[in-house]
Amino acid sequence: MVVEKQPETSNIPDIESQSALIIITKERAGTFTFSNFNDREFVLNKLSTLLSQYSEITDLKTDTPTITLSNPLYLQFNCHDTEELQKLKETSWNNHFSNYGRGSAIYRTNELYELIFQGIPNSLRNELWLIFSGAIHDKAANPNVYQKLVHESSLVKIIHDSTNDEIERDLYRALPDQKAFQQESGISALRRLLRAYACHNTDVGYCQAMNIIGGVLLLYMNEEDAFWTLAALCERLLPDYYNTKVVGALIDQGVFNDYCDEYLPDLYEKLKILGVATCISLSWFLTLFICVIPFESALYVIDIFFYDGIKVLFQLALTILKENQDRLLQCHDDGDAIMILTSYLDGLTDEDENEKKIVRLIKQSYEDYNDINEEDINRLRLKHRLKVVQTMAESILQSAAKNTLKYTSFTEYEIKDLFYVFKDASRISLTEAIDPRKLAYETYRVGRSEYLVLCKYLSPWFIGEHPEDLAKRLFDVYSISTNSNEIDFINFIRLWNILLNEDFNDKLRLIFIAHIEEGKRRDKAISTLLEPITMHPVSKTSDNKQAEAAASTEQASTSVESKEEENLKIKLSLLPLMNQTEFIHLCKTMYDLMTSAADDENLFHSLTTSSTILFKTGEMCKPYRALEDDNKNSDETNNQWTLSFEQFSAAMYAETPIVTWFESNTQQQSLEQRIHNYNQDFLR
């Protein structure tokens, strides 16, 4: 399709050239002229943007095996309406099509609303749900993609194992009363649909309630159409509803509360007192009322929802509350309120003299609340999104602090401060941040460049002429268990715990390991760093048991400390030997660290003395190590210059200026001040 401006020398009469567009369709070579409408530039830019994303569509030719997809499942099982009623509905719709067109170009008329209110016939739901939802365009733009996704999702490794487990668990819970899902054919179709969508949208994967929505779609749509309609529902019609934290549903719950306060203020105050105002609509919206009203009635809601969007759910929910307002105002507790609403919703099956109750209810919702519109909903969504995200961020923060305490000597307050800074630097998406498959401290990650910025502000070792050299080595040590180009919060906090809290020996061990460069030896060394430290017990005892508890705790503490010392000795003995090249790099790092020290003359003298001793030690140990290697049949050292951590540590401990520098270096600036400096520069 080509979009062009209307030429100024138009031969078409009565057209204002500055407000016209000519749209030429490629397939039928049709030319359409649109003129005399507002926002011409906006429409032109929008169409141009869409067309720039368009590429010539060719069928995907893959080697994927042929897969038999399901037709609408209602064809295999008894439908709810009688055949006579279905034919009457079909006749009415065919008459409408002949007058107002069919397909994507169908006119939106009052008559069309009335037809939808009465329910779309089963035979037309596939066609109309696909059109009303906009999924018809997604399907046309992606030929054969569903078949490819079905094949890929059948390969277990393509999607997360836990996602497959969740899908399998929920398959038989989808619509247990429907015969279609009591048979393997229906279950298999639903499995393919959900697994394919999890493969298609890996950020979301699978979320509860998708099984219910997917089941309804499969009843009345063929499998491929059901897939694209599910995608449209999850990604456009109900954005962020079907993710791990149902963020969109929580946001719309806040929007609904605002509407309740505006239209039903007395009832809203009562529901707040009863404690149900903030949760009453969640299950209604999340399942499109499928789980709270009889299935046959829910289909009427789905019909009008696909046509008119999210406003339908708000209108209908408000109407339900209004219908029950008098009884709800008399409730004494939340149980009474829930029972009243449940009883009312269960009763939406009986027919009145002229029409079904659900039809009357939908019509009433349009009469009372038709002024609710998508623009207003989006404005309120923006307001409540901030609240929901802030609440979730606080929850993530609490979780991160709680789960990280055992790995550090930081206080909970300090961990939270560090987490805020780390989170700001990571800038991951909301979807990633609320993934329940990961702990909070595993979710946030920073790359090398962001990490170096954090080092500049937070690390006491980011000093000297080449501070980034040591910083990069430390990054490599702690990124090894996650991703070679990223470090997560748990490993970041482990590293900073050593830099700021641990003793001289731990700092030496860290520097020593950071300079081991060969892969296998390096991995072995790093494993000694990645274990939680044992924190003191925090439980409180009653007054009459304090003395006994104190004695018991002291004895246990002594035993634990003794065992920890023994374990540490074993760990240190397992550290690999350092070769001469690695030791030279280590010496350069030590010199660079201490170039800005006030007492640098004594420090450099100590470094020179210890380095000289260690060089000689490495030379002297060569024949003994060679003999050990022959006895052990090891080729680790090959009779080369080597140095153990115990030798390195002993030489460093012998030089008081070096010990003093490491112990005093972290005290030059508090963690609080370091974080304050970062916030001043980055969070203004």
Image (spheres, grey):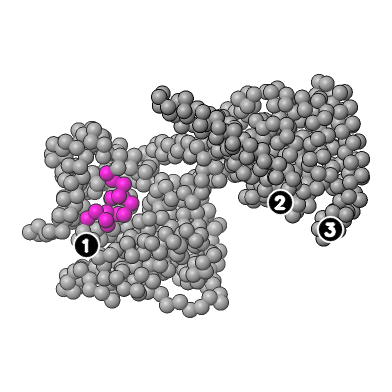
Disc 1 packing (10 Å; few <14; some 14–19; many ≥20): some
Q: Is residue 678 magenta?
A: no
Q: Which residues are magenta?
A: 280-293
Badge 2 element: helix
Q: Would residue 417 appear left or right of 252 to someone viewing this image?
A: right
Is residue 375 at least partly visible in the picture? no
Disc 3 packing (10 Å; few <14; some 14–19; many ≥20): few
Mark closer to the observer (2, 1)? 2
Question: In which image quadrant can residue 106 be found?
Answer: bottom left
Residue 33 vs residue 673, the one in the foreground:
673
Marks 2/3: CA distance?
24 Å
How many marks the image carries: the answer is 3
Marks 2/1: CA distance?
61 Å
For badge 3, the amino acid type reads Asn
Q: Would residue 619 appear left or right of 417 to someone viewing this image?
A: right
Is residue 270 at least partly visible in the picture? yes
For the point 52% across and 40% down, the residue is: 403
Residue named by callout 3 = 631
Residue 351 vs residue 180, the one in the foreground:
180
For badge 2, the amino acid type reads Asp
**Marks 2 and 3, the one that precedes in the sequence:** 2
